[in-house]
Amino acid sequence: MFLTDSHIHLKALPISADVSKALLVSIDRSEWDMVCDFAKKSPSCIIPAFGTHPWFVSKVSQREEYLKQLWFYVQSFPNSLLGEIGLDSSKRHLNSFALQEELFFDQFKLANQLRRPISLHVVGEVSVSSLCQFLRAFPLCRPPSISLHSFTGSLTQLRQLRNAFGEDTNVFLGVSQRLSGRLPLAKLHRLILEMPDNRILIESDDEACNQTYISDLESVAGILSNCKNWDLAQSIINTHNNFLEFALCPQ
């Protein structure tokens, strides 16, 4: 099978044998060792990603020490990424936004320094604005590739982000049944059609074992087929190749 999962969480493991490649993201420091273990057990399938999710930035009390540890873990796996990191300015998380910015921009700079891709959580107009402002202020700080993981913002926000990253970063759109599938179908189609054929990824974003895991990935492939006028097999192969490019995997 050529099915790929560009964003899955620890609690959703083990991954089905029908998936050829999966990006295993972490939400905070407590998950890094387990991510390492799974990546070592399944090196041909699992690509590890390290970082702290914006919802959990308050757990990082000593930022300099945290960044040293993050550097060590990322360097321990030549194929590893940064993720899940980002910004969330939704009402529930707005009170921690200043702290989110501090940690996210440090993690972002580390990804640029080590030339690693990022699985990016960006939710809310304030988050998009903050990230675009940061990118304008640091025009040379550009990791090789970014996945806008389960992005549910507006078409305008998507265009703002792509323009802000410019040509030095390959920007991908991650589409999931779990989150993207909640959008009105017309909006989801507009987001997908905005992206070039080689900049679309399939993801589960599963946080627990899911009996419909494979069918959910295939459902997303079906949505892409309808939008892009691909057949299902072509949709799966195209997103497989896109995943390899996003994650900088040898092809």
Image (spheres, rainbow, N blue to C red):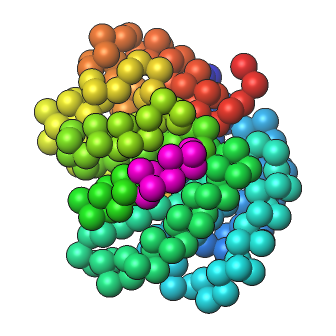
Where residue 117 appears, as percent x and y from the top left, is 62, 44
Magenta residues (range): 134-142
The residue lying at 71 percent from left, 72 percent from top is 67
Q: Quadrant of the N terminus?
A: top right
Where residue 93 appears, as percent x and y from the top left, is 33, 77
| Side (left or right) of 136 relative to 181 | right
Q: Quadrant of residue 28?
A: bottom right
Where residue 21 appears, as percent x and y from the top left, is 65, 35
Q: Quadrant of residue 92?
A: bottom left
**Which of 106/188 is in front?**
106
Residue 48 appears in the figure: no
Residue 20, above or below 196:
below
The residue lying at 82 percent from left, 55 percent from top is 75
Q: Quadrant of the C terminus?
A: top right
**Which of 85/34 is in front?**
85
**Which of 102/92 is in front?**
102
Q: Quadrant of residue 173?
A: top left
Residue 52 appears in the figure: yes
Residue 4, above or below 103:
above
Residue 248, above or below 207:
above
Determine if the magenta segment contains residue 114: no
The residue lying at 85 percent from left, 56 percent from top is 76
The residue lying at 36 percent from left, 11 percent from top is 230
Determine if the magenta segment contains residue 138: yes
Where residue 16 appears, as percent x and y from the top left, is 62, 41
